[in-house]
Image (tube, grey):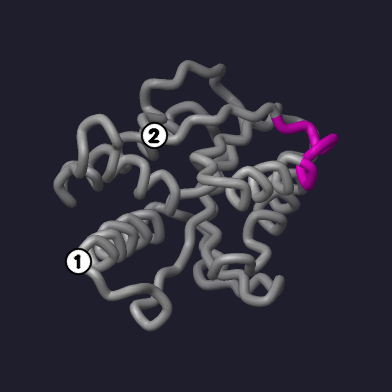
Amino acid sequence: MIHVITGGSGSGKSSYGEDWILEKAKGDLPLLYLATMIPQGEEGRQRVERHRRLREGKGFSTIECPRQLSKLSFPKNRGILLECVSNLAANTWYEEKTGYLSEEETIRRIREDISCLREHTPLLVVITNETSQDLLPSCEEMQTYQRILGRINQYLGGLAEKVTEVAAGIPIPVKM
């Protein structure tokens, strides 16, 4: 089963996703938390630390992997929570050493990552962000990023058996 959880920044989607996968697994599956954020500056480090504290003691094994999830080696039959696709998209699209990939190559690689995760778990929770042109700067890079993330989110929505939007901490079913 794939459950995609989306919402704005700070909406409560990560907490909801963690609680949902814990309830669904009911202790029967070991849980893996794939963290994709590359912390930038003090604010980024604080955010990562906050997320670690929130999931402490919940039974997650954490792997920090900002890109190329398909190259990971992990046991089958794990419940996996992927946090989050918006970071994965940015990290995949741009790497300091090589620069920007094309939109198509970025999307291809992320689809490959998701396909790999699907092969390794019966229960996949994918956290992603919504983007709004009204809230982000309108430079060429942000428009490209929005297109990439929008297309990935559409792909994920089509794959998922369940899609939930979280707004103000309230889960709103989108696809059941």
Which residue is found at the position 27% from the left and 75% from the top?
Answer: 138
Q: Local crowd at mark 2 within 10 Å, few (<14), some, or many (≥20)?
A: many
What amino acid is at disc 1? Answer: Glu
Q: Which residue is mark 1?
A: 140
From the viewer's perspective, is residue 164 above or below residue 117? below
Q: Residue 99 magenta-drawn? A: no
Dot 2 falls on a residue whose secondary structure is loop
Could you tell whether 162 is left or right of 130 in the image? Answer: right
Q: Residue furthest bottom?
A: 134
Dot 1 falls on a residue whose secondary structure is helix
**Residue 136, position as x, y percentages in the image:** 38, 73
* Dot 2 or dot 1, earlier in sequence: 2
Q: Which residue is mark 2?
A: 67
From the viewer's perspective, is residue 113 above or below residue 75? below
Q: CA distance from mark 2 to mark 1?
A: 23 Å
Could you tell whether 112 is left or right of 52 in the image? Answer: left
The image quadrant of residue 160 is bottom left
Q: Residue furthest right?
A: 57
